[in-house]
Structures are given as structure tokens and as C-alpha cells.
Image: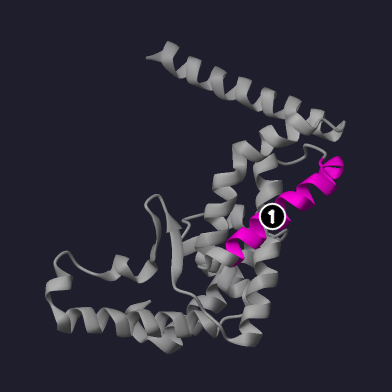
Amino acid sequence: MLQDAAGAVSARAVAKVDEAAVIRAVQHGDQDAFEQLVRAYDQSVLRLAMNLLRSPEDARDVYQEAFLRVYRNIHTFRFDCSFHTWLYRIVTNICLDHLRKRKVRREESAVVETADGPVDRMDSFEHEGAHEDPERRMWNRQLADRISAALADLTARERMVFELRHYQGLRLRTIGDMLGTSEEAAKNCLFRATQKMRGVLGDLV
């Protein structure tokens, strides 16, 4: 048992060392190393963008812009945080820009990415067999519309923190790191978002 645990820790350490070597190679202009880095994170970046923006088109734009910024700015990466955190900070900042533009347009999409492909997020609210109950299905759709409207009323940063916490299940400290702020600031932002959501949804939040 102890040997297995030690082996797992050792494997993670090796993986981290290998990633550091790949990053340093990219910093020295190695194109193959950059492609290797993209392959390691492309699905997680696309999934995060899909979950936050709920638009396949916007998610693809974020994906492309994120790795373009990584390519242009990786020379500034100093290993003082994990590459994962640094990359996700770039992704969330781009998503924030999209959410701000979308808030002006007041356009919302209801699609997210899952392992099974794009699905309606609000399907998760439906009980098994709900498709056999038209009344329940209508209630679920009304609930979905209310939640979408409530999310649309949040600021871009409030929505980002709310989604990362409740839909992605991330800790506030991690969210703060991703947004380049403190855990306390993320906590305060989440509190404001939750209060606004409760104002619209009542006891549903």
C-alpha cells in the first residue's frame, strides 16, 4: 500500500518535472514542445470555456486566443505558480471579456460541454422520467429561464466566480488565483452574486 502511494507521488513528481522541461523548451522556441503543451491542455481549456460561456462558437474563439496568448507570453512564465493556474488565468480573463460583451448585447446561450458533447445545462434539473411528465418538463424549462435571467443580471466577474464555484466546484482560493485576486475578494464577489441570485430566484438558491 505504502509502496503504491509512493509510486503515485513519484509519478506525479516526474510528470511535473517533464512539464517544466517542456515549458522551458517552449521558452527557447521549440515548436514541437509547444504543440505538446497544447495537446496536454487543449481539452481542459475547451471544456472550461464551454462551461463558462455555454457557446461552442465563443468557446472555440477563447481556445484559439488563449493558446495564442500562451505562445506570445510564455517567456514571462517564471514557475512561481503552476502552469495550470497560469493558463486558466488567461482563459478566465478572455472569458470575462466575452461575458462583458455579451452582457451589453444581452445574448445568452444554454449549451455546455460534457463528456457526451454539447447538451442543455438545464437538463440536469430534470428528474428521471420527467420527459413523461409534460407539466414537470414545463416547470423545469421555466426554472431554466429564470436561472439564465438571474445569471444575466450579474456582472461579468460575479458570474465568473459563481459559475466557477457552483458549476465547476473550484475552491475560492483557486478561483482567486485564476482571476488574479485574493481568496477574500473572490468570497466577497461570490456573496454579492449569491445575494443577487436569491433576489431573482428566492429560495431556489
How far across and how far down the image is residue 1, in percent?
37, 14
Q: How many numbered marks appear?
A: 1
How far across and how far down the image is residue 99, in percent?
63, 74
Left or right placement of residue 50 versus residue 84 in this view: left
How far across and how far down the image is residue 189, in percent?
60, 72
Does residue 157 belong to the magenta stretch?
no
Identity of the residue drawn at 27% across and 79% down: 140
In which image quadrant can residue 160 be found?
bottom right
Identity of the residue drawn at 39% across and 85% down: 146
Tell me, yes or no, if residue 90 can be seen here.
no
Give the magenta-colored segment's residue range: 58-77
Dot 1, how many residues are within 10 Å of its Cα: few (below 14), some (14-19), or many (20+)? some
Tell me, yes or no, if residue 58 can be seen here.
yes
Identity of the amino acid at label 1? Gln
How far across and how far down the image is residue 205, in percent?
38, 76
Mark 1 element type: helix
Between 200 and 18, the one lying in front of the other is: 18
Left or right placement of residue 100 versus residue 112 in this view: right
Q: In this view, does 177 lie above or below 99?
A: above
Identity of the residue drawn at 40% across and 49% down: 115
Between 78 and 27, the one lying in front of the other is: 27
Residue on which disc 1 sits: 64
Does residue 67 belong to the magenta stretch?
yes
Q: Is residue 98 above or below residue 7?
A: below
Left or right placement of residue 47 versus residue 128 in this view: right
